[in-house]
């Protein structure tokens, strides 16, 4: 594991396609995702997502992140920057692994690079952002397990709410 990487894992009692469908339904992040309560954009490599992160105990932060990789039911990756590239660059990854018909393993990680990273690693990145990733994992698990009949994103507008 890289020196400045956070890695979290959680097992979700649901088939992988159901977990994927909730994970990529950006318009409904506000229903379950306390860490990234807002996301909008197209799910395609090279597209820009507008996201709002809300690390525990901190103010909301708006970012534009670029989708780097999409593999349906397997992997979603994006890259974001704090203020400008090179200060704090965060490579965010969701990996899904089918354990059996009704269990999915989510490996959720973020790798950091940049000039400021060593100075904020202990005080912010490896504490508050780690807590945020774990909060997202728990919210996803609870929502997916509660809404077993969810079949995927519904087409609707994604206006930003209460941000």
Image (tube, rainbow, N blue to C red):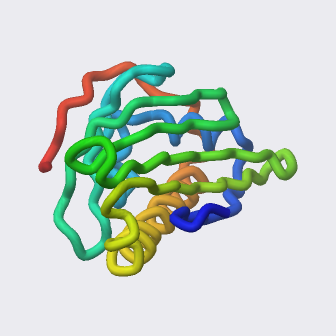
* Residue at the image point whose x is 17% and y is 65% from the top: 59
The picture places residue 19, in percent across and down from the top left corner, at 62, 43
| Residue depicted at x 40% and y 79% | 122
- The image shows residue 60, relative to residue 28, as above or below, that is below
Q: Residue at the location (52% across, 41% down)?
A: 23
List x then y, in percent, for residue 90: 42, 50
Count of numbered tags: 0
> Is 124 on the left-hand or right-hand side of 98?
left
Q: Quadrant of residue 80?
A: top left
Residue 102 is left or right of residue 32, and the answer is right
Image coordinates of residue 61 in percent, x first then y, are 21, 54
Q: Image quadrant of residue 72?
A: top right
Residue furthest front as drawn: 115
Please tell me which residue is depicted at 31% across the width and 63% down the height of the picture: 116
- Where, quadrant-wise, is the N terminus in this rendering? bottom right
Task: Say which of 114 and 153 sits in front.
Answer: 114
The answer to whether 134 appears left or right of 13 in the picture is: left
Viewer-nearest residue: 36 or 18: 36
In the rendered view, tell whether residue 75 sits above or below residue 10. above
Q: Residue furthest left?
A: 162
Q: Tell me where residue 156 appears, x and y as whole percent.
A: 31, 22
């Amino acid at each position: 594991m890289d020196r400045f990487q956070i890695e979290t894992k959680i097992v979700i009692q649901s088939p992988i396609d159901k977990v994927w469908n909730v994970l990529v339904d950006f318009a409904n992040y506000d229903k379950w995702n306390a860490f990234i309560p807002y996301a909008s954009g197209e799910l395609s490599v090279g597209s820009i997502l507008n996201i709002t992160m809300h690390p525990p105990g901190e103010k909301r932060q708006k970012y534009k992140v670029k989708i780097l990789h999409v593999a349906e039911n397997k992997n979603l990756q994006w890259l974001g920057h704090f203020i400008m590239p090179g200060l704090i660059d965060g490579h965010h990854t969701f990996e899904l692994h089918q354990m059996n018909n009704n269990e999915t393993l989510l490996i959720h990680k973020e790798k950091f690079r940049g000039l400021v990273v060593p100075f904020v690693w202990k005080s912010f990145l490896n504490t508050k952002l780690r807590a945020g990733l774990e909060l997202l994992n728990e919210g996803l698990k609870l929502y997916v397990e509660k809404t077993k009949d969810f079949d995927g994103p519904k087409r609707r507008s994604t206006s930003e709410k209460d941000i």
